[in-house]
Image: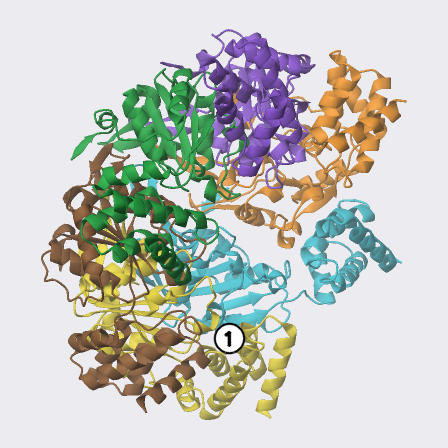
Chain colours: A green, B brown, C yellow, D cyan, E purple, F orange
Amino acid sequence: MQTALKDVLPDQDVPYYQSTGNEQQLFETAWQQHLPLLLKGPTGCGKTRFVSHMAAKLGVPLYTVSCHDDLTAADMTGRYLIKGGETVWVDGPLTRAVRHGGICYLDEVVEARKDVTVVLHPLTDDRRLLPLDRTGELLEAPANFMLVVSYNPGYQNLLKQLKPSTRQRFLAVEFDFPDAETEKAVIMRETGIDVERAALLVRIAGNIRKLTGIDLEEAVSTRLLVYCATLLMANVAFDDAINAAIIEPLSDDADIKSGLREAIGIIRG
Amino acid sequence: MQTALKDVLPDQDVPYYQSTGNEQQLFETAWQQHLPLLLKGPTGCGKTRFVSHMAAKLGVPLYTVSCHDDLTAADMTGRYLIKGGETVWVDGPLTRAVRHGGICYLDEVVEARKDVTVVLHPLTDDRRLLPLDRTGELLEAPANFMLVVSYNPGYQNLLKQLKPSTRQRFLAVEFDFPDAETEKAVIMRETGIDVERAALLVRIAGNIRKLTGIDLEEAVSTRLLVYCATLLMANVAFDDAINAAIIEPLSDDADIKSGLREAIGIIRG
Amino acid sequence: MQTALKDVLPDQDVPYYQSTGNEQQLFETAWQQHLPLLLKGPTGCGKTRFVSHMAAKLGVPLYTVSCHDDLTAADMTGRYLIKGGETVWVDGPLTRAVRHGGICYLDEVVEARKDVTVVLHPLTDDRRLLPLDRTGELLEAPANFMLVVSYNPGYQNLLKQLKPSTRQRFLAVEFDFPDAETEKAVIMRETGIDVERAALLVRIAGNIRKLTGIDLEEAVSTRLLVYCATLLMANVAFDDAINAAIIEPLSDDADIKSGLREAIGIIRG
Amino acid sequence: MQTALKDVLPDQDVPYYQSTGNEQQLFETAWQQHLPLLLKGPTGCGKTRFVSHMAAKLGVPLYTVSCHDDLTAADMTGRYLIKGGETVWVDGPLTRAVRHGGICYLDEVVEARKDVTVVLHPLTDDRRLLPLDRTGELLEAPANFMLVVSYNPGYQNLLKQLKPSTRQRFLAVEFDFPDAETEKAVIMRETGIDVERAALLVRIAGNIRKLTGIDLEEAVSTRLLVYCATLLMANVAFDDAINAAIIEPLSDDADIKSGLREAIGIIRG
Amino acid sequence: MQTALKDVLPDQDVPYYQSTGNEQQLFETAWQQHLPLLLKGPTGCGKTRFVSHMAAKLGVPLYTVSCHDDLTAADMTGRYLIKGGETVWVDGPLTRAVRHGGICYLDEVVEARKDVTVVLHPLTDDRRLLPLDRTGELLEAPANFMLVVSYNPGYQNLLKQLKPSTRQRFLAVEFDFPDAETEKAVIMRETGIDVERAALLVRIAGNIRKLTGIDLEEAVSTRLLVYCATLLMANVAFDDAINAAIIEPLSDDADIKSGLREAIGIIRG
Amino acid sequence: MQTALKDVLPDQDVPYYQSTGNEQQLFETAWQQHLPLLLKGPTGCGKTRFVSHMAAKLGVPLYTVSCHDDLTAADMTGRYLIKGGETVWVDGPLTRAVRHGGICYLDEVVEARKDVTVVLHPLTDDRRLLPLDRTGELLEAPANFMLVVSYNPGYQNLLKQLKPSTRQRFLAVEFDFPDAETEKAVIMRETGIDVERAALLVRIAGNIRKLTGIDLEEAVSTRLLVYCATLLMANVAFDDAINAAIIEPLSDDADIKSGLREAIGIIRG
């Protein structure tokens, strides 16, 4: 059940990804031209899946880092650990990607602490350097290194924004939910559900997404539709499945929840 | 009086749990489909008991973590400790559950620090991975691993909420207090009290729960009713038992407390 | 002058405690039924003395922890210390009480950091467990373990409150100052002062306590009356004793202090 | 130039202290009765000198701790230090006073962190204990131990106050500046200045002190008068001495400073 | 791929830099007169490139530090690290520059923590000293040491400003975007694009820059124009290139983005 | 390039300092009488130079500490460091000055953390002690020790002020910019510039200083005038020199900068 980190990802098959625009061409151009890439879009719209797909297609390892409030530069670059009485340097995921090649993907990069962005700056200059002050090394990124970051513009706040001096170092692509046909295909492929119920779930999602920003902090994701179809395939009753996979994950507010139930009832007819 | 952590829980009998809806079917479906589960509901309504019950029924160890302001990712995944001059890695409860199988239950997950949620993300993706940067391991969760989290929507605040990008990774079930018949049965079973006094306590609880949100921050729990019945069975006078097990635990405000006493007097007739 | 921590307390005589209600019956019932207990009441009203009294009467050691802003879970449970080149685990007071039996008393529990409350949760469940993640132990509290906590509802604030999910795990008793007869007896017993002057001090205290919440943050405690009687017995002049033991400890405000002096002059006649 | 901490103070002569009320009797009674003492009063009014005087008179060492924002309980009680490869426990000043006898004086105690007050609580109970969790010791204070604390009620704020539960553990004495005759004698004794100029300085101070709270945060201290007399004795011109020792130390505001200069000019006539 | 830090930079060719005023003369005078220099200007206007150019031209190593919220004095001066059981001192970039000569460049210096500025003060005095308290050394900067700092006055805030006592220690130069001819030449030189499209991109940038401060936090940089030209040279469609390299990196706001697209459409004609 | 800290300063010549009042007499009296000294005044008015001058004149080493937000008592007094497997105590600059004699100068003392002031208190009492709790030493300052602190009253804020209890321990002197003749002499002496241009720079400074507090946070310092003269002597054009050495270091605001340029143009005539 345990495998070495750097080997695990390129060994696998290319994960399924349904393209929705020119994002593949842009990714490939960025890859060839050694430019860093920024993906913007809502939760669960497929940004992570897209990066996995591209990494597998290009045959390079993928180092994913989910950013958070306490993520520091050292978590990215590495640190000295004491092992068996010896002090050994352990590369962080960014350093591993720079040293051995591969894509380093920082998910929700705006959540990371400020010193992380600074580590990224010299990597996004034309010389693509990663200075490791602690080891005294100055690594130059190889041709098969690429930096990808993402965030969700929907719930940024003033305290957590990418500074313009950082943003302007990236090519940027905006993502959105897949169109109805694509989303239906994804649900059927992932759960084996029939086309009628898949279409119904996509219609329900379309209606809920129109409410986002008014009552709901964020729209229902394709992932939740897949959860819902999974419950239906396990013989959970339709209302129970909708409740557990869509209504309850979206809100704690009794009024909003009954509003959602009503709206879904109308769609079912 | 000391037993190894990982063995203690599955050895025991299945703890008593009175079902109140379809929560058992949903839990079992989530278990079979390898989906993470979110339990929402007020204090003392039985969420923790429910998880213990399901773990024992499924015959798997349960790793419970009560989350709080200072709980970090390292508390969940593990850390290096110096023991007898040697640096040894000690798994945290989440890593133990992933490495050896079992249910990991994070109670009041919104209280944890932000880096904890990030550890949960790759475990709720379809590949169910737990990367341990410090040891260089990438653990894949076995089939008999399940992640369950809970929180109380009643006193969430703006600073402490599950981000939509986290919530939408879970199936969710809402809990409430048991209905009167169920609650009466629980009290009698736990304390041996007679049906009349059990029914009286449940009626009192029903009336107090209607006041919640107006004067009381939270409703009286089944646990407090059990405490009260315990005192009565130990020959504590009725008013003293109500006072020590219900009134004083609910409020410090003299007006609210005398209002509660008055309301209870009316119920007793 | 140095004695081992765990032995010192049960060896001594039962400290004098003048009962003021049913608190002894409730404490004993909680002890027998293995329920945790919460004591509420103002400074210096005798909560700590009551717990000492009960511990000595029950013949079990008492582990008192005065809680504060910087008290963490590790201060309660223990930590690894480096001694003579060896890393040794040193139990904290809570762990000592759980491992060897006894009463663990957390004074002003609302002052402690949030992670402390979490340590208390599994100890207040019916299985009464204390998990020590750092040592990998799961301690089960013996029959002669009891958890007692206290706080002063008079100066709680919004940032420092016991969460309902914690409060509802305790039986609760409210304390107040002793009645005049009891208080007079206490002062005479502790200082050897005559009944007239003891009665005068109690009358003075009664009048000052009526002002609490208006001008004074908190009422004069029995302890201060004992201090005052001690000074009188050491031949300090009456006004000087009142000043040093009552007026100055209660307030820094010149107006309030002269108001108190005037009120006391009237009582003396 | 280096002497052992615990020996230095009792060896010296009793420092000069001019009594201003019954503070010596109260100190001695508190010493005999083993009661802790709280000194309240403005900067530079002689609190520290008073404690030095009493310590020398009683022939016991004095351990002074100037409290501040970052002073923790460990700074008071002690900590483990690594010396020459060995971990050795080093007593803090409070522990030294408890272990070997003496007066421990906490100057400006309200400035200390909250955990310090908690260390003081068991020492102010009738059993006078100092528990050292780190070493596992429970020290009982000897008969010749006394705890003295001080603060300046003039610039307390809401965030930094002694909690009533702490204040009510101390006998309290209020200090103020010495009367004119006493102050004149002090200045002459410390600097050898003639009676006329000493009297003039005291008159100036008296006038400035009436302004305190209106324009000046705090009144001129006896210490500054001594500084001023020292400059005069070193042949600094009168205006320059007043400026350097009184005006500039009291304020940065040009208007206040010229107001003070004018007022002093009138007094000089 | 790994080279020693101090050698890497002077080995390379002089990076291309198109002068826009008297900044080269000022830099050289500052270098000869041993005066520190402050560069002010917006993101991506060429400050960093300018410093690289001057360092290479002067034939001295360049030590660049990107400042951030968590950058401390020790990150600049160095620290003790434990390597192979030995404690060794590792110079930080500032110390390396002072010890061996070279230019130390602090990019976005206002982001650094306050203790960093203090380290700079003695280096900007006429004796140019760097005291290293930890090692007990007092380094005197050699003739070929120079300190350069920069910041962007466009988004300073009240909490993050260079104190006047720091600012007044530097000669200062203001930078702005290059004029149209210069910028066109830069784009053509870096990407090989034809003059027509380069001119169009510069016209687009000129129009967008007029909007800065109204709708856009910061203007489009020359870097983004180069990215855009790179995409065009890789056969990405014009609209897609403008979108990925200019529109999306500048804003997340749908209205602003469509306004920008409209404005660009008009320019293209 | 490396010299031992304690020897470097007294070896040098006495730095040039142009007296502006009775500050030298006051410093010398404070030195003879063992009184601590506080220097108040704006940035760049010569406080630091004055202290260097006096230290050299008195033939004692000078230990300068630039205070900042993160400066702690340990930075002043010293700490244990691990060197070559041994734990050794390393004196901080204050301890070095107390142990070996000399002047310890804390520049911008209000910036330091609160625990620093506390270290200063016993050194400003008449016994002049420095207790080192970590080493168990109690150092008595020798006759040739003096404590000097400074701050700029111009930009103190409420959070960062010297407490009255600290201020009243110092003699205080206020500094201001030198008068026109003195300043002209300084500029000519430092740069060799002719009297006409020196006089012009001083006239410009005089006019700008009248604006301080209205538009400018702080006035132009003598240091900047010296920088400007240095540029002129290096053949930088007058407008460029004024811009780089005066206008840009003083402000980022375009309106203020053009106002300054206009005002300077009028002065030049």
Residue A199 against residue A52 in the figure, above or below? below
Locate the N terminus of chain C by quadrant. Answer: bottom left
Q: Nearer the viewer, residue F50 or A220?
A: A220
- Left or right relative to D247: residue A191: left
Q: Residue furthest front?
A: A269
Which residue is at 41% across, 62% downward? A255
Residue D140 quadrant: bottom left
Residue C164: percent from the left, percent from the top?
36, 67
Q: Does residue E214 appear anywhere in the picture?
A: yes
Amino acid type for the residue under numbered disc 1:
Glu
Residue B17: percent from the left, percent from the top?
17, 66
Residue B188 quadrant: bottom left
Q: Secondary structure at mark 1?
A: loop
Locate the C terminus of chain C by quadrant. Answer: bottom right
**CA neighbours of label 1 inside 10 A, class few (<14), some (14 to 19), many (20+):** many
Residue F129: percent from the left, percent from the top?
54, 47
- Left or right relative to D152: residue D112: left
Subunit bearing disc 1 = C
Q: Nearer the viewer, residue F27 or B253?
A: B253
For the image shown, how many numbered marks are present on the structure?
1
Q: Does residue A224 appear anywhere in the picture?
A: no
Residue B18 against residue E235 in the figure, above or below? below
Q: Nearer the viewer, residue B176 or F82?
A: B176
Residue B115: percent from the left, percent from the top?
36, 44
- Left or right relative to A221: residue A163: right
Q: Which residue is mark 1?
A: C218
Residue F194 quadrant: top right
